[in-house]
Structure formats: structure tokens, C-alpha cells
Image: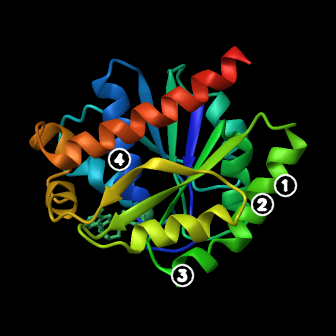
Amino acid sequence: MKTIAVLNQKGGAGKTTISTHLATALHHTGRSVLLVDSDPQGSARDWAAVRAEHPVSVVGIDRPTIERDVKSLAKVDFVVIDGAPQASDLAVSAIKAADFVLIPVQPSPYDIWATEDLVDLVKQRIEVTDGKLKAAFVVSRAITGSNISKDVSAILEDYGLPVLESKIFQRVDYPGTAARGSTVIEDFPRSEGTREMLALSAEIESIILEQEVV
Ligand code: ADP
Ligand code: MG
């Protein structure tokens, strides 16, 4: 079982959008997956509740005992943790539970600066685990045709964590499909949104598996 925690203390960074799509993408490629909603606001639970039948199971764990609780859950290939908008005990607990921490960040310096506390927590944990924990930024809500996400990737590299090649763009279909408790992967399988989310999922899987070989 591998655990991916999607974290950023800033609300609106795209954590829930990416978590629901990542869980769906992993399911789509034949993995068993559980989505853990660690946000007390319960957005991922609300998303799942829109439909009677859901391809992805969602459970809420919004206590700082995620690392322990996750071990007692059903055995699945992947657990995806949708993070809470805070860099406190809940985030620490999600980081401890994780094999991979994904930090979605909007392409703006203000959003990057706001990740500093989280990046410090993640780096401490990487040190404690002798590098077993992996982490990376992903540019989220990038605007098509703008160069800013390129500039932003350069600033992010100064934070000492890798920036994934995959980027998630701003697309109306993300909130549109969320309103139906769905994803672009299910509703628009041939869209650019599906392509970028499947690419993100594949990139993360390859980093996690690479880790196993070493
Ligand atoms: P977080 O969980 O980090 O607070 P959300 O995923 O809930 O962020 O996103 C905040 C808002 O922005 C939501 O209304 C969501 O639908 C919208 N949103 C997030 N990512 C995108 C995107 N790539 N394109 C368009 N809208 C997005
Ligand atoms: Mg959220």
C-alpha cells in the first residue's frame, strides 16, 4: 500500500480537485484506491455524496491520527489523502502517513511563499525517514498560453523540492464535473484535462515505484 498526501495550507490551491482526479486516475488504471478526506470541511465527502454509486470510496479522517488510522483501513494499492487547509497537526499526521507528498501550488509568488511552513515540515520528515519520503510540487490552475508557470517553476526549484513535469491547467470542466460528483476522466475521457490528470498520476506512480527499486 502506498499513500499519497495532497497538501497545501492554502485553500483554493486545487487539493480536492487533484485528489479526486488522482484517485479516479489510479482506479482507471486498475489500482484499488481509497480517498481519505482529512479536511474538516469535508469537500471530498460532499463530492462523493452527490452520486449514489461511486467508483472511488471516500472516508473522512479529520483527526491528527491519520498515520495510525490509515493502517487499519481496507488494504488497497493506493491511499490518496486530500489535505486540510492548515499546516498544523493534521498536516503533520498526513505527512507521517505518506510515501509521497504532492504540493499543488498556484502559479503566483504569493502562493509559493505561503507554502514555506509546509515545505519545512516535509523536509524535516524527509530527513527523519532518510529520504524514504518523496515530495514534489505540481503547478496547479496554470493559465493556458501564459509564461508565468515557467517562471514559477524556477522560483519553486529554490525551495529544494522537485517540480513535477506535469501541470494542471485552469479548466471550467473541473468545477463542472465536481458539481456532478464526477471527474473529467469519467465525463470527458478524450479531453486535455483527462490527459493531464492521467499524466500526473503516471508521473507520481513512476516516482513511487522507482523508490522501491532502490
Ligand atoms: P482546495 O482543496 O485546495 O481548497 P479546490 O480543489 O477545492 O482547492 O479548488 C478550489 C476551487 O477552485 C474550487 O471551486 C475548484 O472547483 C476550483 N478549481 C480547482 N482547480 C481548478 C482548475 N484546475 N481549473 C478550474 N477550477 C479549479
Ligand atoms: Mg479541499
Disc 4 marks a residue whose amino acid type is Thr
Q: Earlier in the sequence, mark 1 or mark 4?
A: 4
What residue sits right under mark 4 in the picture?
20
Query: Which residue corresponds to the image point at 16% horizontal and 54% vertical from the top-left?
Result: 177
What residue sits right under mark 1 in the picture?
124
Instruction: Please report contact status of discs 1 and 2: CB closer than 8 Å, yes or no.
Output: yes
Distance (Cα) linking label 1 and label 4: 27 Å
Distance (Cα) linking label 2 and label 3: 20 Å
Above or below residue 19? Residue 142 is: below
Q: Which of marks 1 and 4 is in front?
A: 1
Q: Earlier in the sequence, mark 3 or mark 4?
A: 4
Instruction: Please report contact status of discs 2 and 4: CB closer than 8 Å, yes or no.
Output: no
Distance (Cα) linking label 1 and label 2: 5 Å
Quadrant position of residue 68: top right
Q: In this view, does 210 lie to the left or right of 185?
A: right
Where, quadrant-wise, is the N terminus in this rendering?
top right
What residue sits right under mark 3 in the picture?
109
Q: Which of marks 3 and 1 is in front?
A: 3
Above or below residue 136? Residue 39 is: below
Distance (Cα) linking label 3 and label 1: 23 Å
Q: x and y percent of residue 91 in the render?
A: 67, 59
